[in-house]
Image (tube, rainbow, N blue to C red):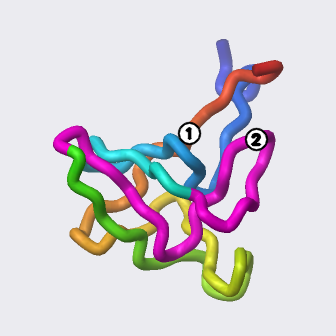
Amino acid sequence: MKDGDSKEAKYLFATIGSLTGRVGHVTTATEGFGFHGLGVAPVGDIGTYRDRNEVVITDGTGFALVIGARPADLFGGSLRNGDRITQMFAKQDGN
């Protein structure tokens, strides 16, 4: 299957479930804004690791997309411990 034929919806914003380079994932999206039922995480929300350690999202879109007075986090965004959002969450169409 070609990439263009994928039936997954991919998001450039960090949504609940997006993964980090150090095997963490975005676990909060506190402002109630989302796409297709997936909350978008703004700066200040949390990523969690397998050992249950939590880290704060520290950068985002600037003024391109503001959610509740905080910039939305993007794919590639930074966390306080130096980790980054490296894999967007992909949701199967129709789910």
Tag nearer the camera, 1 or 2: 2
Q: Residues within 10 Å of mark 2 (few under 14, many from 20)?
A: few
- Which residue occupies 31% across, 46% down? 24
Q: Quadrant of residue 65?
A: bottom right
Name the chief secondary structure element in magenta.
loop
Q: Is residue 30 magenta?
A: yes
- Give the image quarter of residue 33: bottom right
Task: Say above or below: 76 vs 2.
Answer: below
Against 78, residue 4 (above or below) is: above
The residues tagged by marks 1 and 2 sit, at their Cα atoms, a distance apart of 12 Å
- Pointer 2 residue: 37
Secondary structure at numbered mark 1: loop
Q: Residue at x 42, y 56 (%)?
A: 85
Instruction: Please tell me the numbered disc located at residue 7.
Output: none
Residue 49 location, x and y as percent? 26, 46
Q: Position of residue 57 (x, y in %)?
A: 42, 70
Q: Residue at position x 45%, y 51% from top?
A: 26
Magenta-colored span: 29-51
- Asked whether residue 34 is drawn in magenta, I would say yes
x%, y% of residue 44? 47, 75
Q: Nearer the viewer, residue 87 or 81?
A: 81
Q: Residues within 10 Å of mark 1 (few under 14, many from 20)?
A: many
In x, y percent, where is residue 9?
73, 34
Number of numbered discs on residues: 2
Quarter of the image with the C terminus in it: top right
- The residue depicted at 41 percent of the width and 50 percent of the height is 86
The residue labelled by disc 1 is 89
Specify the amino acid type for callout 2: Gly
Three-letter code for the amino acid on which mark 1 is drawn? Phe
